[in-house]
Image (spheres, helix red, strand yellow):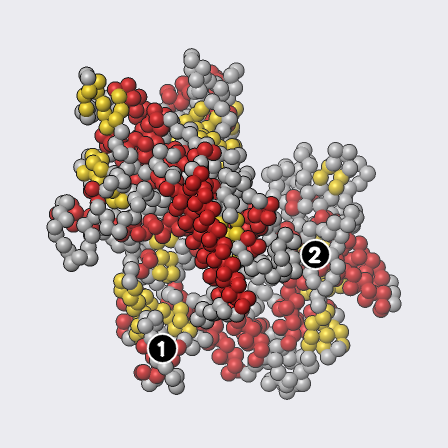
């Protein structure tokens, strides 16, 4: 149990677990396989917090949607695949 | 026929181990003698130079493929080793394999569930995309779990295996010979190899212990014949001779039943020679040396490092169709052009395919011969070679020109010499950004240097104190078209780094345009004619004034001639005094520039208008009117500036730094006050009455106060001096207009040089308790700690001179350190980013299709086209819609003047570029 929810920090972007049924659509949108997406470790504090919120283990291979807000570039969306570690 | 496009695509590369059988199978000859040549200089059969391995002497034919030198690629031979030898490259893998397999049943020391787990992890890595380091990590982790004391399959007890570097294995102190190691590896079953990261179909572990050694073809290790007729062998051949000799002795001793000790010694010697044959820098053993004492360059040394095959011959090749020479300036060339010497133009060629349409033209060109000139002795392009369809090259000479021309036919390729207008790439090292290599159009000129317009100096960071530059001739029509569209100088006026111009006027171009426009001088008809003739215009503007029948023209009206119609702009120029409230149109210093519909109404044209990195007018024209219009403006403006500076005359000398005596006295008094103030602080410090600043110690407070006081003193000296240095002074004109130098430079020349610093503080080191023996120990006053009261004009005292040199030395050391460090950082960055590109959907991916960024820069905006990071310039749109209406207040935040934002941006860009370092060639 972490003392602090890192997702609440201003400098940490939003992390959302992508529903399994949406994964295919996202991969098709960029015409990539999961091996061509950026990665995030399962041990990442953000993933741990997500697991806590969902109250369930998040398996490797699931996708996370990361929504960033920046003063210059505005809102942007990125995806990462969860890997071991 | 040359086939265009991709014929074959590499899908993947697989690395595996060479098996002894394969080594024998690919071998053209078995090498048994260590001798190379016989007495006649002929290669000995089954020797190291056997002609089955290819030939290096012209006239001889390869005994394997029957081809001659350069046709035969060479063939491998092999040496049968008397005893097995460990391959140094694989010791780590051998150790891992020995440690994680059972010494009894040879199976991997993992339970079936552990094997399954490893398999799952490996599959997951493949599925989700893991890089090499991750696979290596997995392998290491598996090896760690497989280190156990008891075998899970046969319950055999395991002994600890250690590696005695570089290649001796021990089992609890007992030495394992390579033969024993090989036997153990042989026994490992195929299915045990998979969890350890080996593919048994292509790699058996026992192949890591050599029983046969491949001998590279002679073409890989050619011997060279010296002038004296002696032959000198390649380092690899020398090493192979050693291997063969020891191998022979080992076999003889073993077969004749020599004592075990002798055999073992020879075996170890063979191991040494084969180890150094692979890598002569293996730690733990002395490198093999040449007779002269030079360490031999063996296989690993050939590949590794900056001078190795990869970095020197594959990533950085020497190329044909290129030239290098000294550069010099030519203000009459277009910024798109480069002047090249005749000599280079004759040597460099472009291939022209002969078609139905150009047959007659090509015939005419060939007919001219290889060195044609016009009737006036001017350069004409000729042809050096004709390549027939069968691939034969025919050299064109004066004698055969006509016959070659007659025999020319469709489908032939003609190598035509350079001619005016051809596109080439021009480059100056270090190539730090993409503007370090731009496409230019050629102008063939007399002389031996490359010449180009001075406006292109800033992107190349070039000057003419002996700089050399490289030039590459583009060969294919596709590449030429691509270079013309993407790389031409005019297309690179706007930098992708900060969205402003990197190409622009420098030095006298700035001074000249300042003189042409500042306070709007009048020019006589003769002078106006001169200026207009420089830009080749005959459409005279209206005369501004007529006095006694003499007509006069305003400088601003003349400058307006090079502005495109429809240009509207207002901004503060470089000479702006930065008043508290800007009077804008009514600026008394003529520093607020107003351009309406392509007419310069008010203000001075200086660095802010057309300078590199800052030129606002140049930036605006490049954005709104296109790169060609920007080029035309720049070329016209600088030519006008040159004619204006010639009319006015411009020079600077040491008396530009003269100030009246009472000004000097005033500075002296002020400096005396300042040093006295510092003395006051020092006294207070010594008395203990100095009050410490919050968070600082007493000594720190003293230093800060002294630095502040003396810094202010220098500024005040500058202010006093500049009161007497007005715009009638050439040096001031250069500093204020931004052409060269700064007001600080001037105040140091006329007023006071100021405090010298090392590591950001006052000078303090040297002797015990003092900087120089000229001062009392413990003196903390201004003079004793590096304050230079004098100015450059009056000269420095000996102590001041020494202090000044200390500060100067630090600057030099800093630049030396900075360049090498930033060079290495740049190299690593480039290597990491070189294969990234922006795809059609705006995402950034590498060559394997992995996404690096989902949308370029997260907003998909090209920084060289965006305005202050945004896609559109709202201020400018408002201006276009509402015009010059100051009365409309848009929430007080929006500024109707365009480029308010850009100006801010430029100032930051400025800070970076201001760090100019003057290095002599």
Q: Residue at x 42, y 37 (%)?
A: B660
Which of these two is toward me, B314 or B717? B717
User: Which quarter of the figure has residue B88?
Assistant: bottom right
Point out residue B187 in the picture as x, y percentages from the top left corner: 65, 74
Are both tags, 1 and 2, on one chain? no
For residue B722, side relative to residue B919 (left or right):
left
Query: What chain does badge 1 belong to?
Result: A
Residue position marked by numbered label 1 in the rendering = A6
Residue position marked by numbered label 2 in the rendering = B280
Q: CA distance from mark 1 to mark 2?
A: 52 Å
Numbered badge on residue B655: none
Q: Vertically, is B121 above or below B350?
A: below
For residue B684, side relative to residue B539 (left or right):
right
- Quarter of the picture containing the C terminus of chain B is top right
Question: Is residue B806 visible to the viewer in this orientation of the structure?
Answer: yes
Question: Within 10 angstroms of label 2, few (less than 14), some, or many (20 or more) residues?
Answer: many
For residue B539, side relative to residue A42 (left or right):
left
Point out residue B261 in the picture as x, y percentages from the top left corner: 85, 68
User: Which quarter of the figure has residue B758?
Assistant: bottom right
Question: Is residue B336 visible to the viewer in this orientation of the structure?
Answer: no
Q: Residue at x 50, y 54 (%)?
A: B675
């Amino acid at each position: 149990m972490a003392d602090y929810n890192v997702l609440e920090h201003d400098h940490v972007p939003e992390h959302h677990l992508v529903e399994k049924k949406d994964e295919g659509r996202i991969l098709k949108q960029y015409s990539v396989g999961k091996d061509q997406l950026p990665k995030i470790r399962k041990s990442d504090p953000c993933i741990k917090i997500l697991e806590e919120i969902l109250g369930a283990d998040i398996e490797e291979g699931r996708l996370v949607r990361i929504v960033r807000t920046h003063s210059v570039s505005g809102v942007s969306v990125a995806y990462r695949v969860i890997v071991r570690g | 026929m040359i086939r265009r496009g991709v014929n074959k695509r590499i899908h993947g590369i697989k690395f595996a181990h060479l098996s002894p059988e394969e080594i024998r199978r690919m071998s053209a000859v078995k090498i048994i003698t260590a001798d190379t040549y016989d007495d006649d200089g002929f290669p000995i059969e089954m020797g190291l130079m056997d002609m089955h391995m290819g030939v290096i002497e012209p006239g001889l034919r390869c005994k394997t493929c029957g081809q001659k030198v350069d046709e035969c690629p060479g063939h491998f031979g092999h040496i049968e080793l008397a005893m097995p030898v460990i391959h140094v490259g694989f010791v780590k893998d051998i150790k891992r394999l020995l440690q994680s397999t059972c010494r009894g049943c040879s199976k991997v020391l993992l339970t079936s569930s552990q094997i399954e787990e490893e398999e799952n992890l490996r599959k997951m890595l493949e599925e989700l995309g893991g890089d090499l380091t991750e696979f290596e990590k997995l392998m290491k982790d598996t090896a760690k779990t497989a280190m156990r004391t008891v075998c899970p399959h046969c319950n055999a007890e395991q002994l600890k295996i250690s590696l005695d570097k570089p290649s001796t294995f021990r089992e609890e102190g007992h030495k394992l010979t390579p033969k024993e190691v090989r036997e153990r590896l042989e026994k490992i079953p195929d299915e045990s190899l998979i969890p350890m990261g080996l593919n048994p179909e292509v790699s058996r572990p026992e192949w890591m212990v050599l029983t046969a050694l491949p001998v590279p073809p002679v073409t890989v290790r050619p011997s060279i014949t010296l002038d004296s007729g002696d032959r000198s062998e390649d380092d690899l051949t020398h090493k192979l001779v050693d291997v063969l000799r020891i191998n022979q002795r080992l076999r003889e001793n073993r077969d004749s039943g020599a004592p075990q000790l002798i055999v073992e010694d020879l075996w170890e010697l063979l191991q040494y020679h084969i180890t150094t044959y692979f890598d002569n820098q293996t730690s733990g053993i002395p490198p093999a040396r040449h007779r002269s004492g030079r360490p031999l360059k063996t296989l690993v040394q050939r590949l590794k490092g900056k001078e190795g095959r990869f970095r020197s011959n594959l990533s950085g090749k020497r190329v044909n169709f290129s030239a290098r020479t000294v550069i010099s300036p030519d203000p009459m060339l277009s910024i798109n052009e480069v002047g090249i010497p005749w000599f280079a133009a004759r040597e460099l060629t472009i291939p022209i395919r002969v078609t139905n349409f150009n047959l007659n033209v090509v015939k005419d060109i060939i007919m001219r011969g290889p060195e044609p000139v016009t009737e006036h002795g001017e350069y004409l392009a000729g042809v050096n070679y004709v390549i027939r369809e069968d691939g034969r090259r025919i050299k064109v000479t004066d004698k055969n020109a006509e016959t070659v021309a007659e025999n020319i036919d469709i489908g032939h390729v003609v190598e035509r010499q350079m001619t005016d207008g051809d596109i080439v790439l021009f480059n100056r090292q270090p190539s730090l950004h993409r503007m370090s290599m731009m496409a230019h159009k050629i102008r063939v000129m007399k002389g031996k240097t490359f010449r180009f317009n001075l406006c292109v100096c800033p992107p190349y960071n070039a000057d003419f104190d002996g700089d050399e530059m490289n030039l590459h001739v583009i060969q294919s029509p596709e590449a030429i078209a691509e270079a013309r569209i993407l790389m031409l100088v005019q297309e690179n006026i706007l930098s992708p780094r900060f969205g402003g111009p990197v190409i622009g006027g420098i030095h006298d171009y700035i001074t000249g345009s300042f003189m042409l426009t500042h306070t709007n001088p009048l020019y006589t008809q003769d002078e106006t004619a001169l200026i207009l003739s420089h830009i080749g215009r005959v459409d005279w503007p209206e005369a501004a004034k007529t006095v006694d029948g003499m007509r006069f023209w305003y400088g601003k009206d003349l400058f307006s001639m090079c502005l495109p119609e429809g240009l509207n702009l207002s901004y503060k120029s470089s000479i702006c005094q930065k008043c508290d409230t800007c009077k804008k149109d009514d600026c008394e210093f003529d520093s607020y520039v107003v351009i309406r519909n392509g007419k310069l109404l008010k203000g001075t044209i200086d660095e802010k208008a057309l300078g590199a990195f800052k030129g606002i007018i140049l930036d605006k024209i490049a954005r709104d009117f296109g790169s060609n219009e920007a080029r035309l403006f720049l070329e016209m403006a600088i030519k006008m500036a040159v004619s204006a500076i010639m009319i006015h005359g411009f020079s600077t000398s040491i008396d530009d730094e003269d100030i009246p005596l009472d000004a000097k006295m005033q500075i002296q008094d002020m400096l005396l006050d300042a040093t006295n103030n510092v003395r006051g602080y020092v006294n207070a410090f010594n008395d203990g009455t100095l009050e410490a600043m919050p968070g600082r110690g007493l000594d720190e407070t003293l230093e800060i106060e002294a630095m502040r006081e003396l810094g202010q003193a220098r500024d005040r000296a500058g202010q006093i001096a500049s009161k007497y240095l007005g715009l009638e002074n050439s040096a001031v004109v250069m500093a204020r207009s931004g052409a060269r130098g700064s007001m600080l430079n001037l105040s140091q020349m006329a007023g006071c040089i100021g405090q010298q610093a090392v590591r950001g503080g006052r000078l303090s080191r040297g002797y015990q308790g003092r900087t120089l023996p000229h001062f009392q120990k413990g003196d903390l006053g201004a003079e004793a700690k590096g304050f230079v009261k004098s100015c450059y004009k009056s000269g420095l005292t000996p102590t001041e001179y020494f202090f000044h040199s200390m500060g100067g030395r630090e600057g030099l050391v800093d630049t030396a350190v900075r360049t090498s460090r930033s060079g290495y950082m740049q190299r690593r960055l480039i290597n990491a980013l070189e294969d990234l590109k922006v795809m059609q959907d705006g995402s950034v991916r590498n060559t394997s299709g992995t996404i690096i960024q989902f949308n370029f820069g997260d907003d998909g905006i090209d920084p060289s086209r965006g305005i202050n990071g945004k896609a559109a310039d709202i201020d400018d749109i408002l201006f276009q819609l509402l015009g010059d209406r100051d009365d409309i207040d848009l929430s007080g935040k929006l500024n109707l003047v365009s480029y308010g934002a850009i100006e801010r941006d430029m100032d930051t860009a400025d800070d970076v570029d201001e760090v100019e370092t003057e290095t002599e060639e």
